[in-house]
Image (cartoon, grey):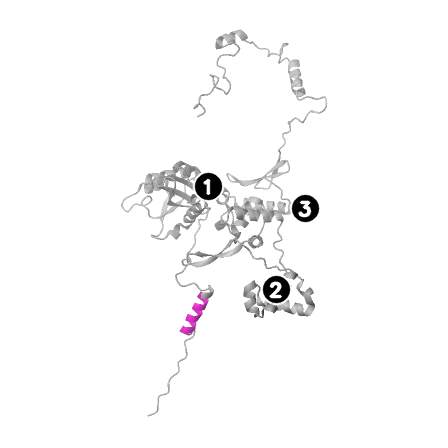
């Protein structure tokens, strides 16, 4: 019986070798480029290291290192690990020395001269990064354009930070979930999002609740408040205040919390929104991504305001959050809406703001090219009702431009302002001329008093009961008694 020939199996395409995969995974993990399944991924963040190493050696230093290497009888790889120079650099130095002698080591290596941005822009970038270490290159790019009228791409910002000593640090983050479908309302007040958030008053060790309403189209926070408890009455009161200030939305999106939705019957909030004719949409259970816009706002509020500060009490927390919301709505740029601020979109002024930014950047670019210093200009743009307006300054004049492009000039210097008196003149000359004209026209009498019946001064003094001061006349500060009490200013 013939022996059966052993069948050879070819590995399936893509299957690979188990041992080779395991060895490759171990090598990658050892090298730091492998992320085990379920482990947090790492992303890039620009930070400033504690100490930088200077690799720009002089000719004397190169000659000394080369001489030390040749005398040590060590290999290039072993010697390079000791001094921090690659072995290829050592070979290049050796070849240059053999060809040109010591002069071959005198030339410096090519050094990139860094960013070509103006010095004003570079200082602004570094100042923003120093004041806000968590800001990345995209955020600094948007804030430069918005607040300083300076233009620098995100890549240019990154180069400036790198030249200043900042390096890219690998920071651990959570693994992103599968890509979700994004949505955005088509116009302001089409859809609002609302949610509740709690934080700790550190000084009192007491947890308080905050509710907020956000316009989905613009990310504009229309209403908020902070209270000791998250009750339905608290949520309804803030909702009515927001409607009174900015109008009612067509739809409202919330989670399934008891403050918004009742399992049985109608909740107080549902009765209020039905009375207002507002449709109510509920997010999917255990799916906070549906309310992603307002959830992201909670993260910004906590990171920028609540975590680094200690509030004295509930009233101070409410006041500080109100100030932060003024900055968030009207000054802080938002990457989700193209670098605009929420107020630009909510008040339908996005196009006007874009045009104003382009004009400001062009003006500053011209001033930087001619004089090296950006011009401090005034720009106001927005809408009044349905009319778009732009207000900007040029020297001592202010130009008001409407939506049709019609410009109206306003002189900042008042036309009737008196100039400084010259030699032989006095500031009272104009007053004396006016008095002379009034006397000539018969408005004043011969004694300089108006031609009308005047009461006797003694009668007025007797009516007041105080010699020399008419009755009812206020003392210093406007107080009839002549002085304010300790609580009168309240």
Choose the circle earlier in sequence order: 1 or 2: 2
Instruction: Point out the residue furthest to the left here.
Output: 264
Question: Dot 1, crowdedness within 10 Å: few (<14), some or many (≥20)?
Answer: some
* Residue beneath disc 1: 324
Residue at 57% x, 69% y is 76
Report the quarter where the N terminus lies.
bottom left
The residue under label 3 is 370
Residue beneath the point at 41% across and 50% down: 292
Q: How far apart are marks 1 and 3 (CA)?
A: 38 Å
Residue 286 lies within the magenta run: no
What residue is drawn where x is 27% and y is 46%? 264
Q: Residue furthest bottom?
A: 1
Q: Is mark 1 on a helix, strand or loop?
A: helix
In this rendering, which labeled residue sits more in front, label 1 or label 2? Answer: 2
Q: Mark 2 points at which residue?
A: 65
- Quadrant of residue 434 within the rendered picture: top right
Stretch of the chain drawn in magenta: 14-29
Q: Distance between the residues labelled 1 and 2?
A: 57 Å
- Main SS of the magenta part reads helix
């Amino acid at each position: 019986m013939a022996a059966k020939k052993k069948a050879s199996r070819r590995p399936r395409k893509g299957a690979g070798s188990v041992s080779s995969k395991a060895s490759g995974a171990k090598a990658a993990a050892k090298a730091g480029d492998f992320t085990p399944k379920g482990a947090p991924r790492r992303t890039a963040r620009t930070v400033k290291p504690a100490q930088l190493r200077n690799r720009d050696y002089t000719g004397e230093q190169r000659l000394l290192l080369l001489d030390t290497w040749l005398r040590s009888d060590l290999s290039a790889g072993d010697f390079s690990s000791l001094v921090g120079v690659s072995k290829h650099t050592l070979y290049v130095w050796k070849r240059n020395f053999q060809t040109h002698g010591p002069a071959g080591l005198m030339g410096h290596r090519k050094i990139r001269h860094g960013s070509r941005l103006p010095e004003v822009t570079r200082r602004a970038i570094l100042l923003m990064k120093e004041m806000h270490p968590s800001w990345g290159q995209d955020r600094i790019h948007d804030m430069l354009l918005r607040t300083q009228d300076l233009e620098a791409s995100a890549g240019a910002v990154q180069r400036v930070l790198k030249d200043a000593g900042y390096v890219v640090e690998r920071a651990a983050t959570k693994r992103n979930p599968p890509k979700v479908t994004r949505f955005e309302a088509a116009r302001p007040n089409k859809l609002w999002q609302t949610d509740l958030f709690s934080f700790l008053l550190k000084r009192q060790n007491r947890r308080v609740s905050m509710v907020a309403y956000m316009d989905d189209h613009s990310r504009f926070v229309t209403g908020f408040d902070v209270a000791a408890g998250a009750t339905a009455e608290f949520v309804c009161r803030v909702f009515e205040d927001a409607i009174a200030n900015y109008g009612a939305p067509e739809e409202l999106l919330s989670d399934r919390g008891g403050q918004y939705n009742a399992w049985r019957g109608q909740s107080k909030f549902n009765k209020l929104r039905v009375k207002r004719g507002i449709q109510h949409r509920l997010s999917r259970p255990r799916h906070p991504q549906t309310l992603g816009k307002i959830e992201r706002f909670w993260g910004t509020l906590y990171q920028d305001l609540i975590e680094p500060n200690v509030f004295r009490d509930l009233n101070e927390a409410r006041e500080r959050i109100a100030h932060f919301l003024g900055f968030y709505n009207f000054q802080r740029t938002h990457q989700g809406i193209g670098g605009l601020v929420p107020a630009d979109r909510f008040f339908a002024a996005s196009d006007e703001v874009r045009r104003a930014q382009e004009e400001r950047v062009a003006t500053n670019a011209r001033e930087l090219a001619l004089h090296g210093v950006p011009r401090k200009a005034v720009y106001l743009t927005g809408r009044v009702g349905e009319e778009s307006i732009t207000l900007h300054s040029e020297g001592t004049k202010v130009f008001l431009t409407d939506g049709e492009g019609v410009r109206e000039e306003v002189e900042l210097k008042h036309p009737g302002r008196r100039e400084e008196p010259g030699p032989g003149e006095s500031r009272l000359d104009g007053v004396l001329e006016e008095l002379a004209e009034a006397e000539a026209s018969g408005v004043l009498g011969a004694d300089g008093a108006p031609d009308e019946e005047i009461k006797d001064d003694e009668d007025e003094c007797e009516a007041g009961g105080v010699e020399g001061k008419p009755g009812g006349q206020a003392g210093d500060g406007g107080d009839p008694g002549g002085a304010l009490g300790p609580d009168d200013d309240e």
